[in-house]
Image (cartoon, rainbow, N blue to C red):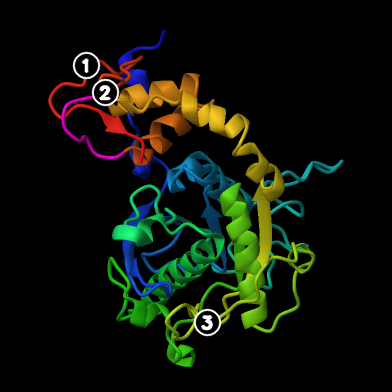
Amino acid sequence: MPSSEAYSPLPFSDFFDESLDFDVDSGDGEAGSFRVYSSGLGRGRAPQTVFVLLHGAGMAALSWACAAKALVDAAVEASAPAPPAPAAGRPGGLGGRVGFGGPSGGLGGPSGGLDGGLGGGGIGIIAPDMRGHGHTRHGGVADGRLDIETLTRDADAVVAATLRHYYAAAAGRPDSSSSSSSSSSGVSSSGSRDGPTGPSAVILVGHSLGGAVATRLSHRRALEADQPLHPACATAPPAMPTPAEPAGGGARSQWPAGAAVRGLALFDCVEEAASASLAGPAAEALAAMPPAFATPGAAVAWAHHAGGVRNLASARVSTPPRLTAAVGPGPSGASGGQGGGAGGEGGGRPWR
């Protein structure tokens, strides 16, 4: 079996450039602190294509860590000067005229490449922890208010805060609402014409519950911007609500000027099947989970061997944020497992 070091947690910085907390009120009258991981943004960079990665229920933003790094690496490769093509031609792959980059039309900007003609600007990545997940915190009842409409408003507001923070800074006019956090007054601004210009293409990517949120968010943004609905949004379930004013009134979240949803990607997102599974396989899987772990390493080992995270690097970076801080002596049911060992002082780490 691998040594205990093989299950030690990995830092987010192995996969993302930065981690920020934004104080956002998405309309329920109670601001929350939302953790956002990002890459390709800041330090003067203003890529024209930004991917927003929305995680599934019970997970956290860092479940996207390996995928986010691979996406950035692919974009760098795609925007690099292509070597001379062999006489017989060469396969497309991610670069050239196929995939992300190339003059035939990619995701970013009029020049087609991912950098949108910004001279290596590349792409941006935004991955937030949803309400009630990871390092995002709301007080009291609000933390457990996880209906789909609330989560969609959250995502809308957090994306707005994150884009305004980075694109205002890139333009040399810092958004007063955003330093390492963003207040609701800056997120929901009616004076957008004086704000920063945002990316021309926002690509929403959702897994499971995150896919449902991404679908509703794309619908919401298209209606607010008076844009034609993407076919995937136009044929959404009838239950999908028309965007409404947030509870308590006030303006909807204001994205930077020019920022618009241009793509939607969904993984394992079939709401009817997911709902049905809650009374069957999902419930059985939840019942079989150890209630707590002696150490984060023990939780990583469990997630890798029995919890469905086959990629060990992903388990090492994504499992720790799903745990709460140690709360007293470890419970009798706390699992040690590989890489765990005794709980020691401070005891068990239950699931969040």
Between discs 1 and 3, the one toward the N terminus: 3
Q: Does 293 appear above or below 51?
A: above
Q: Considering the numbered disc 1 on the image, is that residue within a helix, a strand or a loop? A: loop
Main secondary-structure element of the magenta-colored stretch: loop
Q: Which residues are magenta?
A: 324-331
Question: Disc 2 vs disc 3: Cβ atoms closer than 8 Å?
Answer: no
Q: Which residue is mark 1?
A: 342
Residue flagged by tag 2: what amino acid is it? Ala
Tally the numbered discs: 3
Q: Which residue is mark 2?
A: 294
Of residues 297 and 180, the one drawn nearer to the viewer in this rendering: 297
Separation of marks 2 and 1 at Cα, in angstroms = 6 Å
The nearer-to-camera label among 2 and 3 is 3
Between discs 2 and 3, the one toward the N terminus: 3
Q: Considering the numbered disc 3 on the image, is that residue within a helix, a strand or a loop? A: loop
List x then y, in percent, for residue 146. Answer: 47, 57
Between discs 2 and 1, the one toward the N terminus: 2
